[in-house]
Amino acid sequence: MEASAREGLLVDGAGAPLAEEDSGSVELLDGTHITYRAIVPDNAAALQRFHHRLSERSIYLRFFSAKPELSDRKAGYSTNVDAINRFALVALDPERSEEIIAVVSFDREGDTERAEYAAAVEDRWQGRGLGLALTRHLIEAALKRGIRVFTGVVLPENARMLNLLRDLHLPERLRYEEGIEYVEIDLLPGA
């Protein structure tokens, strides 16, 4: 093991981030414990099943359009991340550990310290604190990788996502363009 130039991230001999750095469990508001870990390429089919379980409204709020199926290509893209510039955490169903119930991710903007943030939580798990808890762990992972600002691209009617971003209690800036809110979150307040 060696430390990466990006803030002490532990990597293996080939320079790949170590998965155990990005796994654990979170406790929801109702006391339920949910395991989370970094996404891996083998999660493509589980990600497609997760997408299929989302309601039309949840899909619309996440993708800004109807998207009843997640294509093999999109699932492959979403699960084949480099774990430095593109990264995602998945939460696993406590009763069926092969099933994804939430995904949070970031995608670095070029060579900057900024990344686009995205999240989706299966409908039956929404409103229980899972998205917020998982996002806090994603922020830890992002900071280890040199990300300092998340930008959330959110429809104004997506109150849950806007509340989640506010509930992080991190400095934010809002920008409204063409019916979409851009919420910039400083991951290192006061830095």
Image (tube, rainbow, N blue to C red):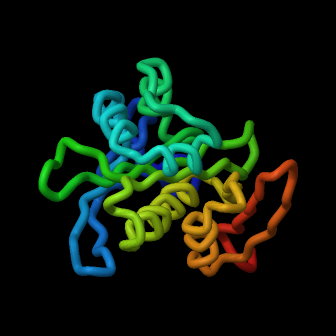
Q: Quadrant of residue 69?
A: top left
At 71% from the left and 61% from the top, the residue drawn is 156
Q: Above or below — where is 155 with respect to 70?
A: below
Residue 160 image point, x, y percent: 55, 67
Task: Pick whichever, 9 or 117, lies toward us.
Answer: 117
Q: Residue furthest top?
A: 73
Q: Residue furthest left?
A: 95
Left or right? Give the position of 94 relative to 72. left
Left or right? Give the position of 147 relative to 43. right
At 61% from the left and 52% from the top, the residue drawn is 117
Number of numbered labels in the structure image: 0
At 72% from the left and 51% from the top, the residue drawn is 114
Residue 12, can we see it? Answer: no
Residue 8, can we see it? Answer: yes
Residue 118 image point, x, y percent: 57, 50
Residue 155 image point, x, y percent: 69, 55
Q: Above or below — where is 58 with respect to 131?
A: above
Left or right? Give the position of 33 relative to 170. left
At 77% from the left and 57% from the top, the residue drawn is 182
Residue 122 image point, x, y percent: 37, 53
Which of the image's four quarters has the N terminus?
A: top left
Task: Pick whichever, 53 or 92, lies toward us.
Answer: 53
Q: Above or below — where is 68 with respect to 106?
A: above
